[in-house]
Amino acid sequence: MADLMKFVNDEIAVNKELPVFSAGDTITVFYEIKEGEKTRTQFFKGVVIQRKGSGTTETFTIRKMSGAVGVERIFPVNLPAIQKIEVNQRGKVRRARIYYFRELTGKKAKIKERRR
């Protein structure tokens, strides 16, 4: 039964070529929004807080500051509305899920860039 579920999920899922990114990276997600008959592209730029799940159910959470208010958005990796993802900066963190980042403000909220 599990093999059948995996087969169906693999057939239905749209395989997109996404860049490699992980927690701590600053990325920009370009996604399509439909408003009635019109469609437009909007972007969301922020720090990846986590990647969760695997396969077709994988999601990632992005956090950005909008003024003094923190805004988080969860995107499924296989969302058809996602047009592209750009990795702006690679961050150096020691955790896979950086929830502690929510409480940080000012200079403490800065993530060091990973050296190549």
Image (spheres, helix red, strand yellow):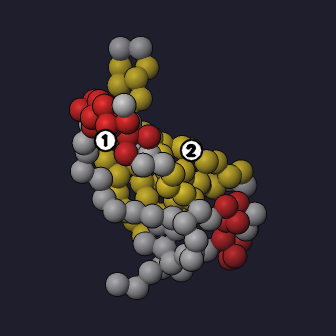
Residue placed farthest to the bottom in the image? 115
How far across and down, in percent of the image, does residue 57 sit?
44, 40
- Residue carrying label 2: 73
Determine crowd level at label 2: few under 14, some 14-19, many 20+ residues with C-alpha closer than 10 A. few
Please tell me whether mark 2 sits on a helix, a strand or a loop. strand
Please tell me whether mark 1 sits on a helix, a strand or a loop. strand
Residue placed farthest to the top in the image? 36
> Of the residues shown, which amino acid type is indicated by label 2?
Arg
In the picture provided, is 82 more to the left or to the right than 16? right
* Residue occupying the point 37% across, 36% down: 2
Vertical order, 19 against 73 (above or below) = below
Q: Which mark is residue 83?
A: 1
How far across and down, in percent of the image, does residue 11 sit?
24, 32
How far across and down, in percent of the image, does residue 61 sit?
54, 50
Q: Quadrant of residue 13?
A: top left
Depth check, front residue: 14 or 61 = 14
* Residue occupying the point 27% across, 34% down: 7
Q: Which mark is residue 112?
A: none
Q: Give yes or no for contact between labels 1 and 2 (Cβ–Cβ under 8 Å).
A: no
Vertical order, 28 against 115 (above or below) = above
Residue placed farthest to the front in the image? 1
Vertical order, 11 against 94 (above or below) = above
In the picture provided, is 70 more to the left or to the right than 96? right
> Of the residues shown, which amino acid type is indicated by label 1?
Gln
* Residue occupying the point 42% across, 54% down: 28
In the picture provided, is 5 more to the left or to the right than 109? left
Q: Quadrant of the C terminus?
A: bottom left
Q: Quadrant of the N terminus?
A: top left
Distance Cα–Cα, label 1 vs label 2 = 16 Å
Vertical order, 23 against 67 (above or below) = below
Looking at the image, can residue 30 be seen?
A: no
